[in-house]
Amino acid sequence: MARSLPAAALTAALGLSACLLTAGPAQAATGSITGLAGKCLDVAGAGSADGTPVQLYDCNGTNAQQWTVGSDGTIRALGKCLDVTGNSTADGAKVQLWSCTGGANQKWTVTAAHDIVNPQANKCLDVTDNNSANGTRTQIWSCSGGANQKWNAPASDGGGTPSGFVVSESQFNQMFPNRNSFYTYSGLTAALGAYPGFANTGSDTVRKQEAAAFLANVSHETGGLVYVVEQNTANYPHYCDWSQPYGCPAGQAAYYGRGPLQLSWNFNYKAAGDALGIDLLNNPWQVENNASVAWKTGLWYWNTQSGPGSMTPHNAMVNSAGFGQTIRSINGSLECDGKNPAQVQSRVDAYQRFTQILGVSPGSNLYC
């Protein structure tokens, strides 16, 4: 279902990483982590005190450069954890060594494209200012694919699905038995790297609940992944807001609903394209011609936009606000608070069906 969102509510999305997530290691692996200029991730002065800086340094084989990538998502050296200072999610937050607490600022995902991502922040382990000098501090920063964010971590055996997504291809097919061939599982998994925190934050239960919630809303919006574009063509000319300074360069009727969450309006195409590094304002047809692009637009909305709600759908699920809040953020102005209970029930039914397929409880607060 297409939706109208105020342009003021649209903000730049989080940083990107053009990679596929791999599953967390099934067992710990230990060794050096090498990065920019072939140098090693290093604990400054081999200190083990809380707050010791983590830096780039010539590889020397000492214990200060021996890191254990754990099955729990931690990366450890000298008995302590790689930690984002102050539990921050901001660009430039420094990385340090700290006593392991199990906090989200100490969780990391090593990707197939050699990024090390903190899912809580949706940001990458980064060498400050792309500087390869010994002693350069590490930080988190929006994922850019730059050389200062590429790391070779200890090899480990992957668990879960080959893509790292909590939904296997067979489960995906079970959820969408009549889906349009356009909506490929590979297109979805290819898009996951754009938002590393999606279905990859919190416990296994929370990750599966978020995946089920996203796919349930997708199912409702697309008739079970049957429709790629909005079916009511009479609506097409309606989605051009000429008050925007960039206008509608692709044409008055070019910004109709497309993709898994039926992206619509010129300002949504502009914002999504800017966030994803794709020119969707001038070429919105990419959303109906490229499965990975289509899935990325759905993930963009899910992870960065609150719509008529008060939080992003991603935050609703990872912060235990409940599935009902994802409905509110997607189409709450038309469906919630008794406006269209049948539509709400359709979404809830899909969510309960998908959580059952994934073997998890749907949790509470299902309705809006």
Image (cartoon, rainbow, N blue to C red):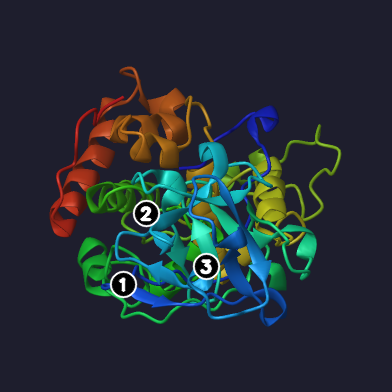
Q: Residue at x 37, y 54 (%)?
A: 199
Pick the front one: 306 or 336: 306
Q: What's the amino acid at mark 3?
A: Ala
Instruction: State which mark lies toward you, 2 or 1.
Output: 1
Q: What's the amino acid at mark 1?
A: Ala
Quadrant holding the C terminus: top left
Q: Secondary structure at mark 3?
A: helix
Residue at label 2? 199
Q: Residue furthest top?
A: 337
Precedes in sequence: disc 2 or disc 3: 3
Q: CA distance from mark 2 to mark 1?
A: 22 Å
Precedes in sequence: disc 2 or disc 1: 1
Q: Secondary structure at mark 1?
A: loop
Give x and y (percent) for residue 20: 48, 72
Q: Is residue 223 above or below residue 30?
A: above
Residue 156: tell me if it is visible: yes
Q: Is residue 50 above or below residue 162?
A: above
Residue 349 occupies which quadrant of the picture?
top left
Residue at label 3? 64
Q: CA distance from mark 2 to mark 3?
A: 32 Å
On the picture, is 227 further left or further right than 223? right
Quadrant holding the N terminus: top left
On the picture, is 294 further left or further right than 55? left
Residue at label 1? 28
Count of numbered marks: 3
Callout 3 environment at 10 Å: few (<14), some (14 to 19), or many (20+)?
Answer: many
Precedes in sequence: disc 3 or disc 1: 1
Q: Secondary structure at mark 2?
A: loop
Are circles 2 and 1 on residues that touch, CB within 8 Å?
no
